[in-house]
Image (cartoon, helix red, strand yellow):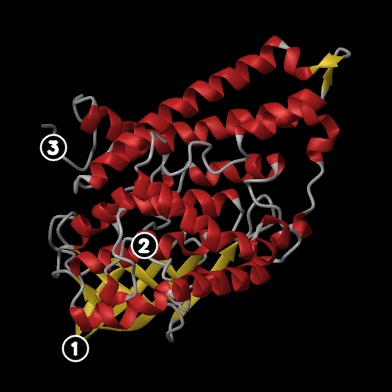
Amino acid sequence: MTSLSPELEAFRDRVVAFMDPHVAEYGQAARLGLSLDDDIALARRWQATKAAAGYAGLTFPTEYGGAGLTQLEQVIFVAEEAARGFPAGYFVISLSMPIPMMLRYATPEQKARFVPPALRGEQIWSQLFSEPSTGSDLAAVRTRAVRDGEDWIISGQKVWTTFAQYSDYGVIVARTDPDAPKHRGLTYFFVDLKAQGVTVRPIRQLHSAAEFNEVFFDDVRVPDAWRLGGVGDGFRLAVETLMIERYTAAADETGFGPPLDALISLAREAQLDGRPALEDGRVRAVIAQAYATQQGLLAISEKSILELAAGREPGPEGSIHKLVGARGRREVALCALDLLGTDGLRFDAAAHPRPKTDFAMSWMDQPTLRIAGGTDEMLLNTVAERILGLPQDYRPDKLPR
């Protein structure tokens, strides 16, 4: 990051002084070997510790338990947290998408009910947008919500819902007017994922963990007081949520994989034809390409941070970051697995390594990043149309412009 002001350097010093005493209890070494359940329990305690110290929700208003600081302080805090391997990822969705949307559009009563407990780690939120039959076409959502007095009755199925099996609440987009044009007949709600009629079915992934889920809604009753925004305004709010999500996914130049330094260290130790792999031209080319790519993404990220600090909204540049970062993670992981040879095939699911520390886990997990928050194909369209100004891609459901 560019040089920080003395005030921000002082903030970083305070953050380091707060975090370092907690490394033994919450850091990467303490998490190795934990089950997913135990890791999430640890994450809840860490979130509560942050809240008690005033470091939860750094950019959120103080009246709702936040610290009222800027995105710059948030970026500094997250970087220091990631460097120590603290378990903050389980709250990324809660505190980066549903709660910020709530702060923008919810009623005072909704904010008071949901925001403070989420900051303390007492609630985990999920995002329920994708459906099996609609792919990435958000406007084609089929899950329905039908008005019944002061309630809505929701029926349908969602998929790709991260950590839904551990979530207490979720945000959902449902079709409330089947006769309206598909972009206008959607409405945005909060839902209780422990309510009667909700069934969560985890999806086992290649690395044996189940971070995603199918969620079925069988006549689930939701009060109208849990609606966010106006009836029929769901598509606009959902797109705004996805823009925030892509910006959040843009927060790591490695695509949330192991750092490039880990590949360099491995290349120093591995041998190719009796010489250190680091001397091999093909390995050096992968490292150089990854470094150049990450520096380019870092420049985009810094520009985005400055835009946010100036009070502007996240733009489509988050699509570039997510698209390129995820692909770069794949290339780095493949090179590392080649260098590891047969050792690269060893994977102990019981040890529950995270993508940040294990190349096998990173390679198996990287396809999820290329789907979550918009597929590669959707992001390419966003870059083409909203950044490069190219004509809109052919869409059979819309007339050409």
Is 260 positioned to the left or the right of 233 in the image? Answer: right
Q: Are marks 2 and 3 in contact (CB under 8 Å)?
A: no
Point 79% across, 36% down: residue: 344
Please tell me whether residue 390 is drawn above or below residue 326 in the rendered image: above
Is 245 positioned to the left or the right of 368 in the image? Answer: left
N-term mark: 2 or 3: 2
Determine the secondary structure under disc 3: loop
Q: Are marks 1 and 3 in contact (CB under 8 Å)?
A: no
User: How many circles with numbers are drawn on the protein?
Assistant: 3
N-term mark: 1 or 3: 1
Frontmost residue, 84 versus 11: 11
Q: Disc 1 and disc 3: Cα gap in Å? A: 38 Å
Query: Disc 1 marks which amino acid?
Result: Glu
Q: Which residue is mark 1?
A: 150
Q: Disc 1 and disc 2: Cα gap in Å? A: 35 Å
Frontmost residue, 244 versus 13: 13
**Where is residue 387 shown, x and y percent of the image?**
24, 29
Packing grade of label 3 (10 A; few <14, some 14-19, many >=20) is few
**Where is residue 21 shown, x and y percent of the image?**
63, 64
Determine the secondary structure under disc 1: loop
| Viewer-side label of 2, 3 | 2
Point 12% across, 60% down: residue: 180
Q: Which residue is mark 3?
A: 399
| Viewer-side label of 1, 3 | 1
| Viewer-side label of 1, 2 | 2
Query: Disc 2 marks which amino acid?
Result: Leu
Is 219 positioned to the left or the right of 34 in the image? Answer: left
Is 96 positioned to the left or the right of 173 in the image? Answer: right
Please tell me whether residue 387 is drawn above or below residue 218 in the rendered image: above
Q: Disc 2 and disc 3: Cα gap in Å? A: 44 Å
Disc number at residue 347? none
